[in-house]
Image: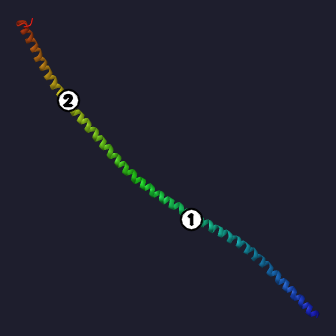
Amino acid sequence: MKRKEERLEKDMAEVLLHNKRLTEPLQRVKEEVTELQKQLANYEKDKTSLAVGYTHNHRIEYMIFNYMVIIEKIGKWKIKVQVELDDLYKKFTQAIQEVQQKSGFMNLLLERKLGALTNTLEKKEAQLNALVVVTRKLEVCYPPWDT
C-alpha cells in the first residue's frame, strides 16, 4: 500500500505539475480572449460608426450633387437673363436714338414751317402796312362821307 500511496502521490505531483503548466497558458488564453472580446466590441463599434459615417457621407454627397445641379440651373438662368437684359438695353438705346432722330427731324420741319410762316407773316404785314398807307393816303385825298 505504501507503494500505491507513493505512486498516487507521485501521480498527484505529476498531475499538479501538469495542472500548473496548463493553468498559466489557460490564464494567458483567458486574458487573450478578454482582449479579443474588447477588440471585437471596438470593431463592432467602429463598424457601426463607419456605417453611420458612410450614410452621412452619402447624404452629403447627394446634397452637394443637388446643389451643383441648382447652381448649374442658376448659371444658365443668369446667362439667359443677361442676354435678355442686353437685348432690352440694345432695343432701349435704339428707341432713344430713333426718338432723338425723329425729334431732330420734327424740330427741323417745325423750324422750316416757322420760317415759312414768318416769311408769309412778314409779307402779309408788309402788304397790310402798304394797304394802311394807301388807305391813309386815300383818306387824306377822299375824306369819309359821314363827316
- Horizontal relation, residue 27 to residue 120: left or right: right
What is the spatial separation of the Cα atoms under label 2 and label 1, in whole angstroms?
80 Å
What is the quadrant of the C terminus in the image? top left
Q: Are marks 2 and 1 in contact (CB under 8 Å)?
A: no
Disc 2 marks a residue whose amino acid type is: Leu
Looking at the rendering, which quadrant does residue 88 occupy?
A: top left
User: Which residue is under mark 2?
Assistant: 110
Task: Tell me the number on the disc at residue 55.
Answer: 1
Above or below, 88 against 71 in this view is above
Residue occupying the far left of the picture: 141
Q: Earlier in the sequence, mark 2 or mark 1?
A: 1
Residue occupying the far right of the picture: 2
* x 60%, y 66%: residue: 50
Residue occupying the far top of the picture: 147
71, 4: nearer the viewer: 71
Above or below, 121 against 79 in this view is above
